Amino acid sequence: MKTSAKDNTSVIILCGGNSERMNFPKCFLSVGNKTLVEQIAEKYCHAQIDKPIIVLNSKFNTSKYAEILDRLSKYTVKVVNTKPQNGRVFSIKLGLKKLKNKNFCFIHNVDNPNICTTLIDNMLKNADSNTYVSPVFNGKNGHPVLIGKKIIFEILNAEDEKQTLREILSSFKKNDVDSGSLNVLENINTLQDWESYLSKNN
């Protein structure tokens, strides 16, 4: 896949969870003067993946976070999820409906904050319309995933709301990309996870 194909690629950043274990929206947790969602979105922009699509839980789409949302509005597309209880695939579908003639799309969870332009480029080089790409470290699958056009179509037309992304992807070939870094496995679910992340990134 040539670098010019980035024009045919988008990214959906999922911020649809309730963040109950953190008692604060994960997407708006800050390292320095940038929130997690801003850091992730900017990394994709730096990699020439323009206008990241952010799927945001409606309870975080309030005046309390207006300053952050205003900053994001300058270079991202916001999709408000009023039914977060419908699950991750529902959130992904909301984001995919905003795609305009894109052949590939990264699916990035906001609580998997680590991404770099090198990994984005390496995943794009292994992209194919009928497959998905996953970064791996020591044989373990990490994040984000990059899906091709056939999978985009499959998700958009999925009728079973209880179906998981893993179940959908199981019908397609996976292309592994060695990330060379434990970072692709990092997941922020608890306060302890967040403190660990901060200790390495502050």
Image: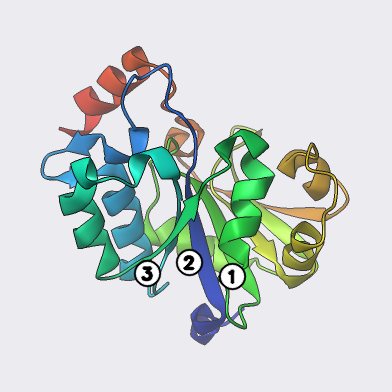
Residue found at x 29% / y 70%: 75
Pointers 2 and 1 in contact (C-beta within 8 Å):
yes
- Mark 2 burial class by Cα count in 10 Å: few <14, some 14-19, many 20+: some
Indicate which label's residue lies in the foreground, 1 or 3.
3
Amino acid found under the numbered disc labelled 3: Ala
Quadrant placement of the N terminus: bottom right
Which is nearer the eye, 59 or 172?
Answer: 59
On the rendered structure, is 121 left or right of 123? left
Instruction: Locate residue 197, reporting x and y percent.
Output: 29, 27
Q: Residue 177 carries which label?
A: none
Q: How far apart are marks 1 and 3 (CA)?
A: 13 Å
Q: What residue did someone put label 1 on?
A: 125
Q: How far apart are marks 2 and 3 (CA)?
A: 8 Å
Residue found at x 79% / y 69%: 150
**Quadrant housing residue 154:** bottom right
Q: Distance between the residues labelled 2 and 1?
A: 6 Å
Q: Which mark is residue 47?
A: 3
Q: Which mark is residue 121?
A: 2
Pointers 2 and 3 in contact (C-beta within 8 Å):
yes
Residue found at x 62% / y 68%: 97
Which is nearer the eye, 103 or 89?
Answer: 89
Which is nearer the eye, 3 or 59?
Answer: 59
Q: Earlier in the sequence, mark 1 or mark 3?
A: 3
On the rendered structure, is 32 left or right of 133? left
**Mark 3: secondary structure:** loop
- Mark 3 burial class by Cα count in 10 Å: few <14, some 14-19, many 20+: some
Amino acid found under the numbered disc labelled 2: Asp
